[in-house]
Image (cartoon, rainbow, N blue to C red):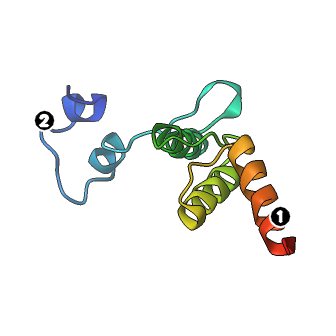
Amino acid sequence: MATLHQRKTHPTYVEGCFGCKIGTQKIGYCGQGGNDASRQKAWDRELDLYASAVRDGMQPETTQTAGVRQSIEWSEKTGIPYSAENKLEHDTNTVLERFAV
């Protein structure tokens, strides 16, 4: 679709023409409530990381990136899928082994 500038001045893009340059510019995304695309992308990445952890058998305590990463690191370190119950059981067994005589 031709811009108004192209219809009135010249039908094709002309290098160096300010009207042609402005006609090709896009307006940034602005969601409802003042959200923007970068915030949405960050939220989507965070939820993708959480979903990936759940697919791997973990049960992170939160969907926030820091909490999910801690769950992943704990699982890699222990070889056990993270969940609050698994962590409690592992920590309890570790303490009992340390103080066993």
The local secondary structure at tag 1 comes to helix
State left or right for residue 68 relative to residue 18.
right
Rounded to the nearest angstrom, the CA distance separating label 2 from label 1 is 81 Å
95, 80: nearer the viewer:
95
Q: Residue, x 76% and y 65% (percent of image)? A: 94
Quadrant for the N terminus, please: top left
Location of residue 10 (image quadrant): top left
State left or right for residue 90 relative to residue 54.
right
Task: Identify the residue position indicated by label 2 in the image.
Answer: 11
The local secondary structure at tag 2 comes to loop
Mark 2 against mark 1, which lies toward the viewer? 1
Location of residue 58 (image quadrant): top right
Residue contact at pointers 2 and 1, CB within 8 angstroms: no
Q: Is residue 88 above or below residue 16?
A: above
Residue 7 in the image, given as x and y percentages of width and height = 20, 28
- Residues packed near mark 2 inside 10 Å, few (<14), some (14 to 19) or many (20 plus): few
The type of residue carrying mark 2 is: Pro
Q: Is residue 57 above or below residue 101?
A: above
93, 7: nearer the viewer:
93
Task: Identify the residue position indicated by label 1 in the image.
Answer: 96
Quadrant for the C terminus, please: bottom right
Residue 88 in the image, given as x and y percentages of width and height = 78, 50
Q: Residue, x 59% and y 29% (percent of image)? A: 31
94, 47: nearer the viewer:
94
State left or right for residue 94 relative to residue 40.
right
N-terminal label among 2 and 1: 2
